[in-house]
Amino acid sequence: MAFNFVTIGEVLLRLTTPRSERLTQARQFDAIYGGTECNVAVALEQFGVDPALISRIPDNDIGQACVNYIRQYGVDTSLVVRSGDRLGLYYLEIGASVRPSAVVYDRARSAMSEIEPGMVDWPSALAGRDWFHFSGITCAISEKSTATVAAGCRAAKAAGMTVSIDFNSRSALWSPEEGAKRLDPLMQYVDVAIGSARDPILGIMLGMEGNIEPDDRTADAYRPFAEKAVSKYGFDKMALTVRDIHSSDHNSWQGVYFDGSEIALSRRHELEIVDRVGGGDGFAAGAIWGVMNGWNPQQVADFATACGAIAHTIHGDFNVASEAEVLAAASGSSDVRR
Protein backbone atom coordinates (compact mmCIF):
# COMPACT_ATOMS: atom_id res chain seq x y z
CA MET A 1 0.00 0.00 0.00
CA ALA A 2 1.32 3.44 -0.94
CA PHE A 3 1.17 6.13 1.75
CA ASN A 4 0.86 9.84 1.03
CA PHE A 5 2.34 12.23 3.56
CA VAL A 6 2.39 16.01 3.72
CA THR A 7 4.21 18.17 6.24
CA ILE A 8 4.61 21.87 6.94
CA GLY A 9 7.78 23.50 8.18
CA GLU A 10 10.72 25.76 7.63
CA VAL A 11 13.73 24.67 5.60
CA LEU A 12 16.98 26.32 6.67
CA LEU A 13 20.40 26.80 5.17
CA ARG A 14 22.77 24.98 7.51
CA LEU A 15 26.35 26.21 7.76
CA THR A 16 28.58 23.74 9.63
CA THR A 17 32.16 24.25 10.76
CA PRO A 18 34.56 21.63 9.38
CA ARG A 19 36.53 19.24 11.59
CA SER A 20 34.54 20.19 14.71
CA GLU A 21 36.10 23.67 14.69
CA ARG A 22 34.67 26.37 16.92
CA LEU A 23 32.49 28.97 15.24
CA THR A 24 35.02 31.57 16.35
CA GLN A 25 37.75 29.69 14.45
CA ALA A 26 35.94 28.94 11.24
CA ARG A 27 37.10 30.33 7.91
CA GLN A 28 34.82 28.13 5.83
CA PHE A 29 31.52 26.31 6.26
CA ASP A 30 29.86 23.23 4.81
CA ALA A 31 26.54 24.36 3.32
CA ILE A 32 23.51 22.07 3.15
CA TYR A 33 19.78 22.44 3.76
CA GLY A 34 17.39 20.88 6.26
CA GLY A 35 14.67 21.38 8.80
CA THR A 36 12.83 19.06 11.14
CA GLU A 37 9.69 18.42 9.09
CA CYS A 38 11.60 18.17 5.83
CA ASN A 39 13.98 15.74 7.53
CA VAL A 40 11.01 13.51 8.40
CA ALA A 41 9.74 13.67 4.83
CA VAL A 42 13.11 12.63 3.39
CA ALA A 43 13.43 9.71 5.81
CA LEU A 44 9.93 8.48 4.95
CA GLU A 45 10.68 8.68 1.23
CA GLN A 46 13.43 6.10 1.78
CA PHE A 47 10.74 3.69 2.99
CA GLY A 48 8.49 4.20 -0.03
CA VAL A 49 6.20 6.97 1.24
CA ASP A 50 5.19 9.73 -1.19
CA PRO A 51 6.05 12.90 0.78
CA ALA A 52 5.22 16.53 0.06
CA LEU A 53 6.39 19.70 1.81
CA ILE A 54 4.46 22.88 2.51
CA SER A 55 6.80 25.76 3.23
CA ARG A 56 7.64 29.31 2.20
CA ILE A 57 10.95 29.80 0.44
CA PRO A 58 12.19 32.97 -1.29
CA ASP A 59 12.01 33.18 -5.05
CA ASN A 60 15.71 33.86 -5.51
CA ASP A 61 18.86 31.85 -6.23
CA ILE A 62 19.36 30.76 -2.62
CA GLY A 63 15.75 29.67 -2.45
CA GLN A 64 16.11 27.75 -5.70
CA ALA A 65 19.25 26.02 -4.42
CA CYS A 66 17.26 24.97 -1.36
CA VAL A 67 14.38 23.60 -3.45
CA ASN A 68 16.79 21.75 -5.74
CA TYR A 69 18.47 20.16 -2.72
CA ILE A 70 15.16 18.90 -1.32
CA ARG A 71 13.94 17.58 -4.67
CA GLN A 72 16.92 15.28 -5.13
CA TYR A 73 15.65 13.22 -2.18
CA GLY A 74 12.24 12.64 -3.71
CA VAL A 75 10.20 15.21 -1.79
CA ASP A 76 7.41 16.96 -3.72
CA THR A 77 8.06 20.71 -3.51
CA SER A 78 5.12 21.82 -5.66
CA LEU A 79 3.30 23.06 -2.53
CA VAL A 80 6.14 25.39 -1.51
CA VAL A 81 5.13 29.06 -1.60
CA ARG A 82 7.86 30.94 -3.46
CA SER A 83 7.92 34.38 -1.85
CA GLY A 84 9.48 36.29 1.01
CA ASP A 85 12.77 38.11 1.44
CA ARG A 86 15.13 35.60 3.03
CA LEU A 87 15.76 31.97 3.82
CA GLY A 88 16.38 31.27 7.49
CA LEU A 89 19.76 29.82 8.38
CA TYR A 90 21.67 28.40 11.28
CA TYR A 91 25.31 27.89 12.13
CA LEU A 92 26.33 24.55 13.62
CA GLU A 93 29.45 23.81 15.62
CA ILE A 94 29.76 20.04 16.03
CA GLY A 95 31.16 19.34 19.47
CA ALA A 96 33.46 16.60 20.66
CA SER A 97 34.02 14.85 23.99
CA VAL A 98 33.21 17.28 26.82
CA ARG A 99 32.42 20.18 24.44
CA PRO A 100 28.76 20.10 23.33
CA SER A 101 27.57 20.99 19.87
CA ALA A 102 26.26 24.53 19.52
CA VAL A 103 23.71 26.18 17.24
CA VAL A 104 23.35 29.88 16.40
CA TYR A 105 20.08 30.73 14.64
CA ASP A 106 19.66 33.49 12.08
CA ARG A 107 16.02 33.04 11.14
CA ALA A 108 14.27 36.21 12.30
CA ARG A 109 11.95 37.63 9.61
CA SER A 110 12.54 34.57 7.43
CA ALA A 111 10.08 33.82 4.65
CA MET A 112 8.54 30.94 6.61
CA SER A 113 8.12 33.01 9.77
CA GLU A 114 5.88 35.36 7.77
CA ILE A 115 3.71 32.69 6.13
CA GLU A 116 -0.05 33.19 6.50
CA PRO A 117 -2.91 30.66 6.30
CA GLY A 118 -4.30 32.18 3.11
CA MET A 119 -1.05 31.59 1.23
CA VAL A 120 -1.82 27.85 1.08
CA ASP A 121 -4.63 26.33 -0.98
CA TRP A 122 -5.48 23.75 1.68
CA PRO A 123 -8.02 21.61 -0.23
CA SER A 124 -5.59 21.25 -3.12
CA ALA A 125 -2.53 20.75 -0.89
CA LEU A 126 -4.15 17.96 1.13
CA ALA A 127 -6.10 16.25 -1.66
CA GLY A 128 -5.26 12.56 -1.81
CA ARG A 129 -3.01 12.72 1.26
CA ASP A 130 -3.30 10.41 4.26
CA TRP A 131 -1.11 12.08 6.89
CA PHE A 132 -0.38 15.66 8.03
CA HIS A 133 2.68 16.35 10.20
CA PHE A 134 4.02 19.43 11.98
CA SER A 135 6.38 20.26 14.81
CA GLY A 136 6.66 22.66 17.70
CA ILE A 137 9.56 24.38 15.95
CA THR A 138 7.33 25.71 13.19
CA CYS A 139 4.96 27.13 15.79
CA ALA A 140 7.90 28.62 17.71
CA ILE A 141 9.13 30.84 14.90
CA SER A 142 6.08 33.14 14.83
CA GLU A 143 2.40 33.55 15.61
CA LYS A 144 1.72 33.68 11.86
CA SER A 145 3.31 30.29 11.32
CA THR A 146 1.32 28.93 14.27
CA ALA A 147 -1.91 30.21 12.71
CA THR A 148 -0.94 28.56 9.42
CA VAL A 149 -0.24 25.24 11.15
CA ALA A 150 -3.62 25.51 12.89
CA ALA A 151 -5.35 26.06 9.54
CA GLY A 152 -3.58 23.00 8.17
CA CYS A 153 -4.64 20.90 11.16
CA ARG A 154 -8.27 21.93 10.77
CA ALA A 155 -8.23 21.16 7.06
CA ALA A 156 -6.49 17.83 7.62
CA LYS A 157 -9.01 16.69 10.22
CA ALA A 158 -11.88 17.78 8.00
CA ALA A 159 -10.36 15.64 5.25
CA GLY A 160 -10.11 12.62 7.57
CA MET A 161 -6.31 12.61 7.68
CA THR A 162 -4.09 11.41 10.50
CA VAL A 163 -2.34 14.34 12.21
CA SER A 164 0.97 14.05 14.06
CA ILE A 165 3.19 16.41 16.03
CA ASP A 166 6.81 16.25 17.11
CA PHE A 167 7.07 18.67 20.02
CA ASN A 168 10.76 19.42 19.37
CA SER A 169 11.42 21.83 22.22
CA ARG A 170 13.95 24.57 21.35
CA SER A 171 14.94 26.83 24.23
CA ALA A 172 16.59 29.30 21.83
CA LEU A 173 13.23 29.98 20.16
CA TRP A 174 10.81 30.16 23.08
CA SER A 175 10.38 29.37 26.74
CA PRO A 176 8.69 26.12 27.79
CA GLU A 177 5.83 28.18 29.19
CA GLU A 178 5.27 30.01 25.89
CA GLY A 179 5.58 26.74 23.99
CA ALA A 180 2.95 25.06 26.13
CA LYS A 181 0.60 28.03 25.76
CA ARG A 182 0.87 28.14 21.98
CA LEU A 183 0.76 24.39 21.35
CA ASP A 184 -2.05 23.48 23.74
CA PRO A 185 -4.90 24.63 21.43
CA LEU A 186 -3.51 22.47 18.61
CA MET A 187 -3.63 19.24 20.59
CA GLN A 188 -7.32 18.70 19.79
CA TYR A 189 -6.30 17.83 16.22
CA VAL A 190 -3.42 15.46 17.04
CA ASP A 191 -3.69 11.69 16.66
CA VAL A 192 -0.02 10.72 17.06
CA ALA A 193 2.22 12.63 19.49
CA ILE A 194 6.00 12.33 19.31
CA GLY A 195 8.56 13.92 21.58
CA SER A 196 11.29 13.53 24.15
CA ALA A 197 10.54 12.04 27.54
CA ARG A 198 12.49 14.96 29.03
CA ASP A 199 10.84 17.70 26.93
CA PRO A 200 10.05 20.63 29.27
CA ILE A 201 7.08 21.74 27.16
CA LEU A 202 5.48 18.32 27.47
CA GLY A 203 6.24 18.35 31.18
CA ILE A 204 4.39 21.64 31.64
CA MET A 205 1.46 20.59 29.46
CA LEU A 206 0.98 17.33 31.34
CA GLY A 207 1.95 18.60 34.78
CA MET A 208 4.42 15.75 35.30
CA GLU A 209 7.94 14.71 34.33
CA GLY A 210 8.43 11.94 31.79
CA ASN A 211 12.09 11.23 32.41
CA ILE A 212 12.93 7.99 34.22
CA GLU A 213 16.34 7.25 35.76
CA PRO A 214 18.30 4.57 33.84
CA ASP A 215 18.13 1.94 36.59
CA ASP A 216 14.35 2.30 36.82
CA ARG A 217 13.53 2.14 33.11
CA THR A 218 10.89 -0.33 32.06
CA ALA A 219 8.07 0.07 29.58
CA ASP A 220 5.55 0.33 32.42
CA ALA A 221 7.57 3.08 34.11
CA TYR A 222 6.57 5.35 31.21
CA ARG A 223 2.91 4.29 31.25
CA PRO A 224 1.64 7.02 33.65
CA PHE A 225 3.18 9.76 31.49
CA ALA A 226 1.80 8.33 28.23
CA GLU A 227 -1.59 7.60 29.73
CA LYS A 228 -1.82 11.16 31.08
CA ALA A 229 -1.15 12.53 27.58
CA VAL A 230 -3.73 10.25 25.97
CA SER A 231 -6.29 11.01 28.67
CA LYS A 232 -5.82 14.79 28.62
CA TYR A 233 -5.53 15.37 24.88
CA GLY A 234 -7.15 12.33 23.28
CA PHE A 235 -4.06 11.18 21.37
CA ASP A 236 -4.42 7.75 19.80
CA LYS A 237 -0.73 6.96 20.10
CA MET A 238 2.46 8.39 21.60
CA ALA A 239 6.17 7.85 20.92
CA LEU A 240 8.97 9.15 23.14
CA THR A 241 12.74 9.31 22.79
CA VAL A 242 14.90 8.51 25.81
CA ARG A 243 18.43 9.96 25.73
CA ASP A 244 21.34 9.86 28.18
CA ILE A 245 24.22 12.19 27.33
CA HIS A 246 27.60 10.82 28.39
CA SER A 247 29.57 13.18 26.16
CA SER A 248 29.04 15.16 22.98
CA ASP A 249 29.79 12.14 20.81
CA HIS A 250 28.57 9.34 23.10
CA ASN A 251 24.88 9.10 23.97
CA SER A 252 22.65 6.22 25.03
CA TRP A 253 19.39 6.08 23.12
CA GLN A 254 16.06 4.29 23.55
CA GLY A 255 12.46 4.77 22.54
CA VAL A 256 9.00 4.22 24.00
CA TYR A 257 5.79 3.62 22.09
CA PHE A 258 2.24 3.55 23.49
CA ASP A 259 -0.70 2.57 21.29
CA GLY A 260 -3.34 3.57 23.83
CA SER A 261 -3.31 0.16 25.46
CA GLU A 262 0.07 -1.57 25.21
CA ILE A 263 3.41 0.11 25.85
CA ALA A 264 6.89 -0.97 24.73
CA LEU A 265 10.47 0.11 25.42
CA SER A 266 13.16 -0.49 22.80
CA ARG A 267 16.56 -1.94 23.43
CA ARG A 268 19.32 0.49 24.36
CA HIS A 269 21.66 1.76 21.64
CA GLU A 270 25.09 3.16 22.50
CA LEU A 271 25.72 5.89 19.93
CA GLU A 272 29.08 7.13 18.67
CA ILE A 273 27.73 10.29 17.14
CA VAL A 274 28.77 11.65 13.77
CA ASP A 275 26.05 14.33 13.59
CA ARG A 276 23.32 14.68 16.19
CA VAL A 277 21.10 17.05 14.19
CA GLY A 278 18.12 15.15 12.81
CA GLY A 279 18.33 12.22 15.22
CA GLY A 280 14.94 12.94 16.70
CA ASP A 281 13.50 13.45 13.22
CA GLY A 282 14.74 9.98 12.28
CA PHE A 283 12.90 8.61 15.30
CA ALA A 284 9.74 10.47 14.32
CA ALA A 285 9.88 9.10 10.78
CA GLY A 286 10.39 5.58 12.10
CA ALA A 287 7.44 5.90 14.46
CA ILE A 288 5.20 7.27 11.70
CA TRP A 289 6.21 4.42 9.37
CA GLY A 290 5.41 1.85 12.06
CA VAL A 291 1.99 3.39 12.70
CA MET A 292 1.25 3.53 8.98
CA ASN A 293 1.94 -0.19 8.73
CA GLY A 294 -0.04 -1.13 11.82
CA TRP A 295 2.92 -2.72 13.61
CA ASN A 296 2.68 -3.83 17.21
CA PRO A 297 4.12 -1.55 19.92
CA GLN A 298 7.43 -3.40 20.28
CA GLN A 299 8.02 -3.31 16.53
CA VAL A 300 7.28 0.42 16.39
CA ALA A 301 9.51 1.21 19.39
CA ASP A 302 12.39 -0.84 18.02
CA PHE A 303 12.15 0.50 14.47
CA ALA A 304 11.74 4.15 15.45
CA THR A 305 14.66 3.98 17.85
CA ALA A 306 16.91 2.27 15.32
CA CYS A 307 15.91 4.82 12.67
CA GLY A 308 16.92 7.65 15.02
CA ALA A 309 20.12 5.82 15.93
CA ILE A 310 21.18 5.57 12.28
CA ALA A 311 20.43 9.26 11.76
CA HIS A 312 23.10 10.07 14.36
CA THR A 313 25.69 8.34 12.17
CA ILE A 314 25.03 10.34 8.97
CA HIS A 315 26.49 13.77 8.29
CA GLY A 316 23.77 16.30 7.56
CA ASP A 317 20.13 16.68 8.54
CA PHE A 318 18.70 13.94 6.31
CA ASN A 319 18.46 10.29 7.31
CA VAL A 320 19.01 8.42 4.05
CA ALA A 321 18.63 4.86 5.31
CA SER A 322 16.43 2.14 3.83
CA GLU A 323 13.89 0.11 5.75
CA ALA A 324 16.17 -2.94 5.51
CA GLU A 325 19.07 -0.98 7.02
CA VAL A 326 16.91 0.23 9.89
CA LEU A 327 15.59 -3.27 10.57
CA ALA A 328 19.19 -4.56 10.65
CA ALA A 329 20.12 -1.84 13.15
CA ALA A 330 17.08 -2.69 15.24
CA SER A 331 18.27 -6.30 15.46
CA GLY A 332 21.75 -5.16 16.55
CA SER A 333 23.52 -6.11 13.33
CA SER A 334 26.49 -3.89 12.45
CA ASP A 335 28.51 -6.34 10.35
CA VAL A 336 30.03 -5.28 7.02
CA ARG A 337 27.59 -5.67 4.13
CA ARG A 338 29.27 -7.43 1.18
Image (cartoon, rainbow, N blue to C red):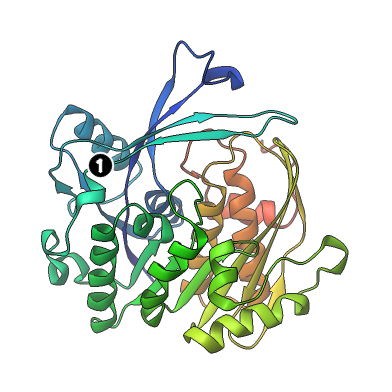
Q: Residue 169: x and y, percent? A: 51, 56
In screen coordinates, is 161 left or right of 126?
Answer: right
Residue 323 drawn above or below residue 266: above
Quarter of image, res 259: bottom right
Q: Residue 295: x and y, percent? A: 57, 75
Quarter of image, res 52: bottom left
Q: Secondary structure at mark 1?
A: loop
Q: Residue 160: x and y, percent? A: 29, 83
- The residue at the point 50 percent across, 14 percent down is 26
Neighbour tally class for label 1: few under 14, some 14-19, many 20 plus, Cα within 10 Å? many
In screen coordinates, is 251 left or right of 53?
Answer: right
Nearest the viewer among 286 and 3 is 286
Q: Quadrant of the C terminus?
A: top right
Total labels: the figure holds: 1
Residue 22 drawn above or below residue 123: above
Q: Residue 261: x and y, percent? A: 63, 88
In screen coordinates, is 188 left or right of 289?
Answer: left
- The residue at the point 76 percent across, 61 percent down is 267
Q: Amino acid at mark 1?
A: Ser
The residue to which callout 1 is attached is 110
State whether residue 336 appears in this view.
yes
Nearest the viewer among 276 and 315 is 276
In screen coordinates, is 81 left or right of 279?
Answer: left
State whether residue 166 appears in this view.
no
Nearest the viewer among 202 and 119 is 202
Residue 95 drawn above or below residue 12: above
- The residue at the point 25 percent across, 41 percent down is 110
- The residue at the point 39 percent across, 41 percent down is 34
Q: Quadrant of the N terminus?
A: bottom left
